Amino acid sequence: MSVDVFALPLTRLSLAEAPGGVLDVLLNRPEKRNALDSAAVEDLVALFDAVPRAGVRAVVLRAAGDHFCAGLDLVEHHKADRSPAAFMHLCLRWHEAFNKMEYGGVPVIAALKGAVVGGGLELASAAHIRVADATTYFALPEGQRGLFTGGGATIRVTQMIGKPRTVDMMLTGRVYRGQEALPLGFCQYLTDGSSDTLAHELAAKVAQNLPLSNFAITSGVSHVQNMSALDASYAEAVLAGVVNTQPDARERLAAFADKTAARVRPDQG
Ligand code: 1HE
């Protein structure tokens, strides 16, 4: 049974349909630079809980205003004067949201711009593809604010850029951007134009893959990272057994066999 994401009572996110089964998700609190308060985190949990059962073929996660996301809502956090247990439980909701994003099996493409900092970088790192534009910059300013990352930076940012670089960013507040950030792994694409536009182009392409292939690529690659090499090779074989024999693939294989399918060429981008 398909879930209707448009029926969700979201307050911090706006949704729109894009062609080809792509869902456009807008972080929509630009006046606060899309800082993640508890309402935003609950929206992300509700949305990414529903997305895998909603027939969505790919998600573009983008932002209103000049900045992707300023991280934890520091004003809410200051006013709430939370106990250690309360903040731990809040962090667990962040993990719930980001794990649903990463492991849900539906490709998520983040269109970045401006500040992608603190929890904003943690949010971006849960996406499968990150597209940056010329304004995008990455930082983990928690250390300077008397805080520590709690939304998965120790896990996903270290996977993206490595432990020494992550620790340096945390300690010194170092900022990365542009041509320096790209080869380090902060993003897979850097555009001179609009990251929204490129993210949508990529989503349209990704959405043409069979959903079961995309499920295996996104959730499968993430899951096997958590396994021993022995278990990972077993899991990969089981996944491939299911995906590579799916009836929907027969048409594509037939097209290759009868030479009507596109060949892989070096100039296709
Ligand atoms: C916010 C937040 C926020 C902006 N929480 N309200 N993250 C940070 O340390 C980043 C903090 N933010 C900034 O450094 C800057 O705001 C920005 C570089 C993102 C944007 O600068 P700018 O000049 O465009 O905007 P601004 O004037 O600083 O802020 C505009 C408004 O957004 C203002 O509210 P207003 O009511 O006074 O207009 C700001 O208070 C508000 N705003 N960022 C709350 N983060 C699970 S642990 C995760 C740990 C973390 O993420 S720590 C946070 C790291």
Image (tube, rainbow, N blue to C red):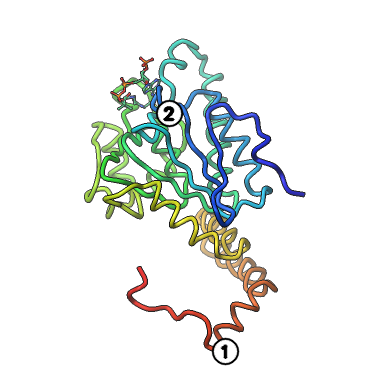
Return the residue at label 1.
258
Label 2 to label 1, Cα distance in Å?
50 Å
The numbered mark, 2 or 1, whose residue comes first in the sequence reads 2
Q: Is residue 242 left or right of residue 168?
A: right
Quadrant of the drawing holding the C terminus: bottom left
Q: Residue at x 63, y 63 (%)?
A: 212
Q: Residue at x 35, y 36 (%)?
A: 116
Q: Position of residue 75 (x, y in %)?
A: 42, 15
Return the residue at label 2.
34
Q: Is residue 238 above or below residue 220?
A: below
Q: Which class describes the residues within 10 Å of circle 1: few (<14), some (14-19), or many (20+)?
A: few
Q: Residue at x 29, y 44 (%)?
A: 164
Q: Secondary structure at mark 1?
A: loop
Q: Is residue 167 above or below residue 1?
A: above
Q: Secondary structure at mark 2?
A: loop
Q: Amino acid at mark 1?
A: Asp
Q: Is residue 181 left or right of residue 244?
A: left
As rendered, which of 58 and 144 lies closer to the eye?
Answer: 58
Q: Which class describes the residues within 10 Å of circle 2: few (<14), some (14-19), or many (20+)?
A: many
Q: Position of residue 3 (x, y in %)?
A: 71, 44
- Displayed-image quarter of ligand 1: top left
Q: Residue at x 23, y 32 (%)?
A: 172
